[in-house]
Image (cartoon, helix red, strand yellow):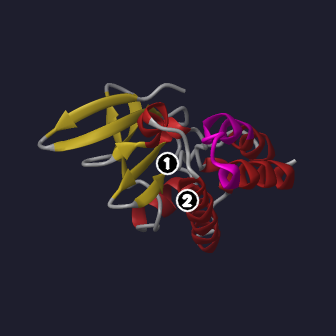
Amino acid sequence: MKADYKTELGKSYMILDCVEKEESFAMQMLKENHIQGLLLFEKRSFNGEVQFFYDVTDMNPLAKQMKESPLSEKKLRQLLQELYCVLEEIHSFFLSPEGILLQMEYMYEKGGRLFFCYYPVKEADKWEVSIEMFAEMLLDQIDHEDEEAVELAYQFYAEVK
C-alpha cells in the first residue's frame, strides 16, 4: 500500500485508497469516535473511488526521523508504550489490532506524542505477521551503540516470537 499526500486549506493529509465499498464496523467506529493515539481520518469519495484522508497537519513522520537518527532506548520505550496504550484503547472500541499499520511511514509524532494509522478494512495483515515484521524492523532502526536500546529491542523481539 502506498500513501499519497495532499495539502488543502492549510491542512496536510496522508491519503490511502480504500479497497472496500461497504462501510465496515471499524470505519463507523473511527468516524464517530476520537480514539486517543490514532490519526484522525475522513472517508472521501470522488468519481467512484474511495479514499481515506488522514490528518497529519504539523506532524513529523517517524520514518523521516529514523533516517536522521536511529532509535534511542528512550524513543524506543516511548514507541512501545504508546503502541501498548493504543492497543488498549482500540480494544475498548471493539476494534481489531490488525488495522494498525505498523510501518514507520504510517506513524507520526506531534508534541512529543506518537500517532498511529488505523486502516479499517478487512485486507489487513494478520496481527502475528504484522507485529513480527515490526519487531524485526525495530532491530534495524535502533541505535546499536545504545546498549539499553539493543537490550529492549531484542527483548521485545523475543516476546513477539
Q: Mark on residue 79?
A: none
Tell me, for residue 117, which label it has, or none: 1
From the image, give the main secondary structure of the stretch colored magenta.
Answer: helix
Asked if the magenta segment contains residue 145, the reply would be: yes
Region rendered in magenta: 136-149
Disc 2 versus disc 1: nearer the observer: 2
The quadrant in which residue 113 appears is bottom left
Among the two numbered marks 2 and 1 on one chain, the one whose residue lies closer to the N terminus: 2
Residue pointed to by mark 2? 74
> Looking at the picture, how far across and down is residue 23, in whole percent?
51, 49
Q: Is residue 139 left or right of residue 83?
A: right
The 10 Å Cα crowd at callout 1, few under 14, some 14 to 19, many 20 or more, is many
Q: What residue is at 61 percent from the left and 43 percent from the top?
A: 102
**How far apart are the two marked residues, 2 and 1, measured between alpha carbons?**
22 Å
Residue 22 x %, y %? 53, 43
- Which of the pair 85/81 is nearer the observer? 81
Q: Nearer the viewer, residue 51 or 2?
A: 2
x, y (%) of residue 126?
76, 43
Is 95 positioned to the left or the right of 15 in the image? right
Q: Amino acid at mark 2?
A: Lys
**Three-letter residue code for mark 1:** Cys
Query: Which quarter of the image is occupied by the N terminus?
Result: top right
- Asked whether residue 128 is drawn in magenta, I would say no
Disc 2 + disc 1, Cβ < 8 Å: no
Kindly give the residue lying farthest to the bottom in the view shown: 92
Residue at 53% x, 50% y is 118
Query: Circle 1 sits in a helix, a strand or a loop, which is it?
Result: loop
**Residue 26 placement (x, y as % from top left):** 56, 56
Q: Secondary structure at mark 2?
A: helix
**Which is more toward the observer, 37 or 96?**
37
